[in-house]
Amino acid sequence: MKKFCQSCGMPLDKDPEGGAKNSDGSVSELYCSYCYQNGEFTQPDFTAKEMQAFCKEKMIEEGFWKPIAWLFTLGIPKLGRWKNK
């Protein structure tokens, strides 16, 4: 089963660093290295809507078509980091 970052939704197998690192140096099974480093979120004050906008912009910069970037970021508010906020 494919795992996705519980902050931005990126497939964890696409993480160029092989996954985020927890504070003890172990690999996080929940977050990618773009969202989480050394046991902390890289954007700790982001809301789910801000993460959606940030991810859409990055995807468009990477060459994704705008409607596809929008579609891929729709589920962000339902991910683990944002569920209870």
Image: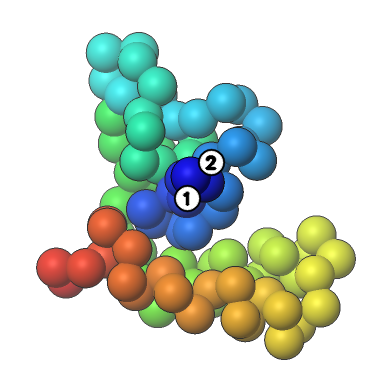
Seen in the picture, residue 38 relative to 59 is either above or below; the reply is above
Q: Single out the residue that lies furthest toward the bottom.
A: 67
Q: Quadrant of residue 59?
A: bottom right
Q: Is residue 50 visible?
A: no
Write the residue at 79% across / 65% down. 61
| Quarter of the image where the C terminus is located | bottom left
Viewer-closest of 68 and 50:
68
- Looking at the rendered structure, the kind of residue marked 1 is Phe
Residue type of the residue flagged with mark 2: Leu
Q: Residue 76, how many percent across, how many down? A: 42, 70
Badge 2: how crowded within 10 Å, few (<14), some, or many (20+)? Answer: many
Instruction: Please identify the residue farthest to the front as the structure is shown.
Output: 1
All told, the count of numbered labels is 2
- Camera-nearest residue between 41 and 65: 65
Q: Disc 1 marks which residue?
A: 4
Marks 2 and 1: CB-CB under 8 Å? yes
What kind of element bears circle 2? helix
Q: Is residue 26 left or right of residue 85?
A: right
Q: Nearer the viewer, residue 29 or 41?
A: 29
Residue that badge 2 annotates: 12
Left/right placement of residue 18 relative to residue 49 reads right
Please provide percent x and percent y for residue 40: 30, 36
Using a 10 Å C-alpha cutoff, classify the residue at mark 1 as few (fewer than 14 neighbours), some (14 to 19) or many (20 or more).
Answer: some
Tell me how far mark 2 sits from mark 1, CA to CA: 5 Å
Q: Eyeballing the image, is 32 above or below 18?
A: below
Corner quadrant of residue 42: top left
